[in-house]
Amino acid sequence: MKLNLTSSQSAVARSRAPAARGVKLAPARRNVSVSALPPAESEANDALAETISRKVKPMLVSDLLNVPKLKRRGLMMAGAAAMFGCECCSDMLGTGAAQANASWTYKEDGFSGPDFWPDQCLTGGAQSPIDLSLANNRPQAGRGTIKFPVGPLQFDYGRYEKVNVLNTGHGTMQVNFQPGNMVTVPKRYVPVRPPSQLLASSPGGACLCPTKPFDLDLIQYHFHTPSEHAIDGKQAAMEAHLVHRNKNTGGLAVVAVLIQPGGPQPNPCLELGLEEAPTEGGVQQASTKTVNPAMLLPRATSQGTQPYVHYTGSLTTPPCSEGVDWFVLTTPIKVPDKQVLDFMRFAGNGKGYVRNSRPLQPINGREIDYSDQFQI
């Protein structure tokens, strides 16, 4: 299956402003479900289940999942830390065992939560996730209005294949692929400073330099709840990350897909993860079913388009290595309410509904490409 992401224009926004190496034998599988909750579930969990089961409209994540609002201590700490340099370049993909045994968590209390994550999580100045402003299909006022052409982003996800499924030990399953599912990023134009260095310039006076096309090879996908990225201050119920490796440079790129409740049919990519993931953190096993990662991509709108955003950021888990290309598809896919709850319960190791998303990070003057279209 080949999909084309096309964008005729993009706006540059300016402001101030983490595969598997588990080798242990897996225990018997467990289908994570919320169909039979123990009677002693907390009132908070009951309230959450009721909220999602009502198929509410997208809302502030603080309302949907009862987590702190966007202005939080972690955001302030990251902003203050941006003034420091860091040359930590440890394994950008990590390993299953390392992820499961690491002492970091998503807890808001204690000294292991996001506010205390090490390495570039604390000192980096180009971290992910971020809040993306798409109001009126353009950047917020004061974030720049320079526009320039952007070519098609081409997905070549067409194969059903068996995969390896890892329980990361950090609230998600990771579905690992063999090489062959490709994304091609075409030539883009990026601003170059100072303007005097180039003769050509775009409207508004910014000089633009073309980049070379490059290919991305899918490595794995995994999930977070709630979504890690926000759109105009609002987060979705979940977010899928399709992690790729740049075939030319070896760097990482992530396609992020927002997920909302209310869908009529279970998503097969999420369902495979829930059904096939080992129960023990740091363990992986071969799947008994096949999956096609294209089932995680949103379809075109009634107008045949789908917007997306590109920026350069980081991994959203320790060590939070930077230099990651992000492509955020801004129209969500929908899954049944039960799948959202099942994943949240998986994140809590079957003991409650738990979140596994990093707080939003400051933009710190990064340029953000806002596309116009996603075309099949």
Image (cartoon, rainbow, N blue to C red):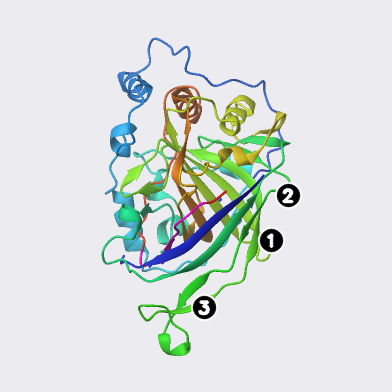
Q: Does residue 368 belong to the magenta stretch?
A: yes
Q: Earlier in the sequence, mark 1 or mark 2?
A: 2
Horizontally, residue 104 falls left or right of residue 135, namely right
The part of the image, by quadrant, that contains residue 162 is top right
**Please, what secondary structure does the residue beneath circle 2 have?**
loop
Residues at discs 1 and 3 in contact (Cβ within 8 Å): no
Compare residues 191 and 3 and report the one nearer the observer. Answer: 3
Q: Mark 3 sits on what residue?
A: 209
The part of the image, by quadrant, that contains residue 138 is bottom left
Q: Amino acid at mark 1?
A: Lys
Task: Give the image location of residue 227, x and y in percent.
Answer: 42, 41
Q: Which residues are magenta?
A: 364-374
Q: Amino acid at mark 2?
A: Gly
Q: Is residue 343 above or below residue 83?
A: above
From this viewpoint, is residue 196 visible? yes
- As measured in the structure, the alpha-carbon distance from the residue carrying label 3 to the one carrying label 2 is 30 Å
Q: Mark 1 sits on what residue?
A: 247
Q: Does residue 361 belong to the magenta stretch?
A: no
Q: Is residue 19 above or below residue 247?
A: above
- As measured in the structure, the alpha-carbon distance from the residue carrying label 1 to the one carrying label 2 is 11 Å
Structural crowding at the residue carrying mark 1, measured as other residues with C-alpha within 10 Å and reported as few (<14), some (14–19) or many (≥20): few
Q: Earlier in the sequence, mark 3 or mark 2?
A: 2
Question: Label for residue 63?
Answer: none
Task: Give the image location of residue 276, x and y in percent.
Answer: 64, 27
Residue appearing at x 61%, y 24% in the figure: 275
Q: Mark 2 sits on what residue?
A: 180
Residues at discs 3 and 2 in contact (Cβ within 8 Å): no
Q: Amino acid at mark 3?
A: Cys
